[in-house]
Image: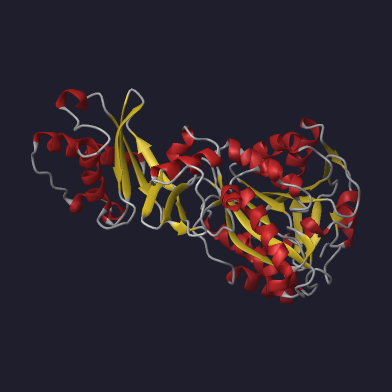
Amino acid sequence: MPDTAHAADTRRPAVAGLFYGDDADGLRREVQAFVDGGVPSDLVPRALIVPHAGYVYSGAVAGSGYRALANIERPVRRVYLLGPAHRVHTRGVAAPSHRWFATPLGRISVDRAVLDDLVSRYDVVQVFDQAHDHEHSLEVHLPFLQAVLGDFSLVPLVVGEIHPRRLAPLLDAMFDDDEGLVVVSSDLSHYHAYDEACAIDAGTVACMERLDWQAMRPERACGFLPVSALLLSAAQRGYRVHAVDVRNSGDTAGPKDRVVGYATLLVHERRRRFDATTRDRLLALARDAIDHGIDGRPFAVDASSWPAHCAARAATFVTLTVCGALRGCIGSLEPDQPLIADVADNAVRAALHDPRFGPLSRAEFDGVRLSISVLGTPTAMEFSSEQDLLRQLRPGEDGLILACGDKRATFLPSVWESLRAPDAFLAALRRKAGLPATFWSDAIEVKRYTTESFAEP
């Protein structure tokens, strides 16, 4: 706790002993237990969305987000912490005048230089201590940050009435800070019956995962404004959002008749398993395989010279285009052979055995552009109706496998480039499977997957 010499410069804890413990040793053990028990993830977060209720209700869910900070290899010297105003009516964004924020675990220095710069650069940011004095949405995260990061400076901001488009430039500036971490504080729906809350929160999480910032509403999340701005900025940067833990107070420590929803989501960059050199080698492998196939010469792949993850089993697609027009596309949905063998086989099949085209000729070969997509593991989607399925789709990100009876088809995520609307994407996929474009049945099964794709220049 701060000494009296710094009392005027310090924002003292307002909800210690209420939302979380006020004994330092007990608090440290409690927070560490939440982090250690969090849902593991191998994603490297650029930002967190984490809940802010009392620890008995949401601490375990928040722990999953703070556990993921161990995946960050770069130094995190500054935390931009944004949360909604609950206690005091606030216009725009409220910055504090304090130099320290205190918890039972000690003091955290406020990065006055960064905070003063935001106040001077953005007219939506103003110093307004009253918004901070009793606000819990920021405070409950401080012990987690202290336990996980140790030494860091804080840029605390309470978000009041503001359009997300006006707030997004601040998020852009925060993402530009190579030593910074963005943490946005928000709970989900409030005071619905358990089953209703689960359905509402699943829809909200789906909106966040597909970066649909305009779908956020106050009834979906109390921190909908900073969440919306975060999603908008993330979408413009090509980041992704992934939920690692979604529960409510009925799951943790409360009754099920009136629950509050909680979720931890990670904002992260697209994962790349293959560096530029390996990508070029795989593309050259595909071209070499086609070159041999056109002449009918046998082609063998020596796995010993490749990285281990290229010799591991994987499912791939190889696509051929000429002047932007499709010339062949064949792939695998199951990881039945080593990745390098799958790329070579699918390259030859796309060039010579795609039933939509004749075999690629030697004259055409030099003018063909190759691209490779490596599929992630398909996961089954759960949905109650066609509209529910459409709401969950993530344009530009999801590849889909649709099956109904003996009918089956897939679209890679790249198909979103020509079919941007979810309903058009789904209709075309049904036609590809040999079903009517408007067909619907409870027997429809859908799996989604993501890809890492790369192409020749």
Decide which of 282, 409 is in the foreground and name it. Answer: 409
- Residue at 67% over, 42% down: 213
Count of marks, rendered view = 0
Does 131 sit above or below residue 365? below
Which residue is rendered at x = 91% and y = 47% of the image?
89
Q: Residue at 69% of width from left, 44% of height from top?
A: 215
Q: Quadrant of the C terminus?
A: top left
Q: Quick check: 270 left or right of 62?
A: left
Camera-side residue of 362 and 166: 362
Q: Is residue 46 visible?
A: no
Residue 364 vs 158, above or below: the answer is above
Residue 212, image x and y in percent?
64, 43
x%, y% of residue 100? Answer: 80, 54
Among the 4 quarters of the image, the one containing residue 250: bottom right
Q: Residue 277: image x %, image y %?
A: 31, 40
Q: Residue 251 placed where, x, y %? A: 68, 73
The answer to whether residue 350 shows anywhere in this view is yes
Q: Is residue 275 left or right of residue 438?
A: left
Position of residue 401 relative to residue 104, above or below, is above
Left or right: 445 with respect to 240? left
- Of the 4 image quadrants, the one containing the N terminus is bottom right
- Looking at the image, is 228 positioned above or below residue 243? above
Colour style of the rendered protein structure: secondary structure
Which residue is nearer to you in this view: 2 or 276?
276
